[in-house]
Image: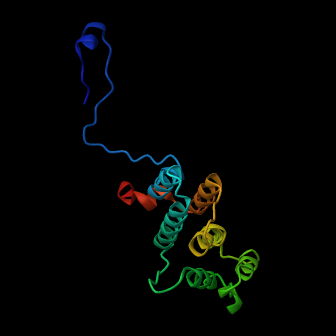
Amino acid sequence: MEQKGLFAKIFGVKKKPVFPDSTQVRVKHVGDIPPMVEARRLIGNEDTRSAIITLYNAAKKDYSRYFKVELNDNEPNRQFLIRSFMTFGINIPEEGNLDNTFIQDYMNDPPSINENMVNQFSALRKLATFYLEFYEKVRFSSGFKGDPELILEKASDIYNYMDVPKLYYPEAYK
């Protein structure tokens, strides 16, 4: 549908077509998704602790939703991570329930990963790293102050292995 105004009629200039019922979703990068926006707001308000908790919880739910991994509300975060690594053949010993080095050592030396599951494994490893480096420290210790830029960078690393527009705006892809 092309419209012409007075200027266009006089000088023969055409306006661009107008499409009244069209909607475009533009997610330029991971920083545009709601958890990242909320975390930046919290960090701006000097509430790094809440930003880390918000980012981890959102990333865990998004990981679960995107890769269709079952969440159990009664399962602690550490158990979720250990159980998730088991699906890749990484059996973290019981000591991993108390000692972070067991989780780090086992996740950094995985067996051969199925080519179709490389993104899922990479996202899980980034999620576990975020949990161990930030989430666990703010939840179970006082006075932890992390570098806000590093926190946001590590959180966005998790989402780099998921199709963010499809995750947050699936109706745009129907």
Q: Is residue 56 above or below residue 146?
A: below
What residue do we see at 59% from left, 80% from top?
Answer: 81
Residue 20 image offset from top left, x and y in percent: 25, 38
What residue do we see at 55% from left, 63% from top?
Answer: 49
Residue 173 image offset from top left, x and y in percent: 39, 56
Q: Is residue 46 above or below residue 72?
A: above
Q: Name the one closer to the observer, 147 or 33.
A: 147
What residue do we see at 31% from left, 19% from top?
Answer: 14
What residue do we see at 47% from left, 59% from top?
Answer: 35
Which residue occupies the extreme top position in the image? 10
Quarter of the image for the N terminus: give it. top left
Residue 155 image offset from top left, x and y in percent: 58, 60
Snapshot quadrant of residue 112? bottom right
Q: Name the one closer to the observer, 171 or 103.
A: 103
Horizontal side of residue 16 vs 66, given as left or right: left
Residue 10 image offset from top left, x and y in percent: 26, 7
Q: Is residue 10 above or below residue 145?
A: above
Which residue occupies the extreme bottom position in the image? 94
Which residue occupies the extreme front position in the image? 143
Quarter of the image for the C terminus: give it. bottom left
